Image (spheres, grey):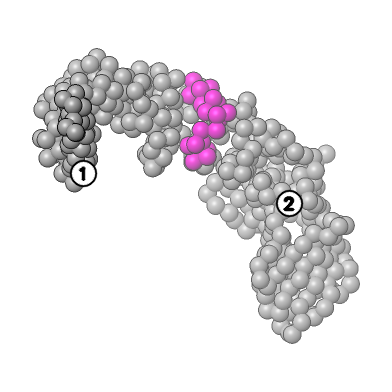
Amino acid sequence: MAASPSKTVKIQVIALVALIAAWQSYQFAVTVNLRVADPEAALQRQPDDAFALAKVVKNKSRAAEEYVSDAADTSAAIQSLVKTPLSRSSLRIIGMNSAAAGEAQTAFAAMSLADRVSRRDTTAQIWLLERAAASDNFDAILRHYDAAMSVSPELGPILLPIMVDALQYRQVREGMRTYVLRQARWMPGFLSLAARDASLDNLVDLMRPVAGALSGEEYEPSVAQIIYRLAANSGEDAAMELAEAVWGDFDAEKFSDSSPSEANLDRRLGLLAWELGEDSGIQSRLNVNGAIEVTMRPLSRGVVVRRHFPVEGGQTYNLMQRVNFKGEGGARLAWRGDCVTNSGSERIWEQALPTSMDAVTYQSEIAIPSQCNILALSLTGNGADGQLPTDASISEFSFSNNSAG
């Protein structure tokens, strides 16, 4: 039986729709491939293709090692907006070219719209950041900085120093606390650079109201460096106050005790904490009674313990400990004291400990130079020239200001 006319028409319409869909799919596939392989050809094929236009401008700029575009690109960008009204790349091209032509308001309007469409256009964010900086719009500076760094963290070497320098402005410090609390992804890198380069007063002012938000492991090296700088510049009390604000479980009183303990082995404090030697030849450990037990293999050499102490320049400090050697004779222990300043360190004191097999209490006085605020104390060891390891213990340790009072 022959098919009815209506059924035949329906079949033909379905076939035509399928053919059109197939052709559109083919055209789309060709365009997508051309966008990557030959964006200029893709743009000629489809002049309103915003993606192809963006690739063309990007390739020209990369070849010239600077932004390169012209009036034809602006025209193409305007044309592409008819098809894709929310194309951030086309809006950005219009904005950049308008800025180059001195059309500031048009440029700002285009860039602002690109920002509203998507915060992922880094070029637009950098342009808006610079404009905000020129007008001292601190909220906008931080918003565009956050967008640029969140999308393109590889810009860190360029953008991070700029924001570290901007900490000199109170409005930036106040605004940045929001991003500390938000745990912005660029904050650990920022704090790492700021801990080294920023003004200490500005850093502390930034941190104090939001210190608890910086307690994560990713911040520990930076916070330790800031606390160390604070100890050197403002004294131990100021440093411990900030440490307690950052870490809720930190006990400043126990940490400040000079005698080694679990509390002042806290590695979050970096060099201000006791560090026990753990290399292959010398092993140090803290026993339940608070004594340091040391094992030195034959001919080994290295650090037994070390710690940086905040001190007062021009004062005399007393170091005391009880030492007991066990095992092979010929081993050696010696203290070293180095004054640490911004320009480096200088050896100011040394004391070798006799290798007596009896428990002996040793006491020494250390005169601190007037310009010295941090003393790096380290106990080094040498294993005996024999077949067996040497054990030693250091107990009843104390380091105190002999001039106080």
Which region of the structure is painted magenta? 171-191
Quick check: is 163 in the magenta stretch?
no
The outermost residue toward the bottom is 387
Residue at (52% x, 39% y) in the render:
188
**Residue 47, placed above or below residue 85:** below
Q: Where, by quadrant of the figure, is residue 1 drawn?
A: top left
| Residue at point 77%, 39% (across, down) | 251
**Other-residue count near label 2 (Cα within 10 Å), few / some / many at <14 / 14–19 / ≥20:** some
Q: Position of residue 388 (x, y in %)?
A: 76, 82
Q: From this viewpoint, is residue 107 visible?
A: yes
Above or below residue 243? Residue 332 is below
Residue 214, given in percent of the width and then of the height, sits at: 61, 35
Helix, strand, or loop for circle 2?
Answer: helix
Residue 279: % across, % down: 66, 67
Q: Report how far apart the C-alphas of labels 2 and 1 lie in the structure.
A: 60 Å
Which of the two discs, 2 and 1, sits closer to the camera? 1
Q: Which residue is mark 1?
A: 33
Q: Disc 2 or 1, which lies upstream in sequence?
A: 1
| Among the 4 quarters of the image, the one containing residue 355 | bottom right
Location of mark 2 (residue): 265
Residue type highlighted by circle 1? Asn
- Quarter of the picture containing the C terminus is top right
Q: Position of residue 108 (x, y in %)?
A: 28, 18
Is 177 part of what is drawn in magenta? Answer: yes
x 13%, y 30%: residue: 47
What residue appears at the point 64 percent right and 38 percent down from the top-left corner?
A: 215
Question: What secondary structure characterizes most of the magenta part?
Answer: helix
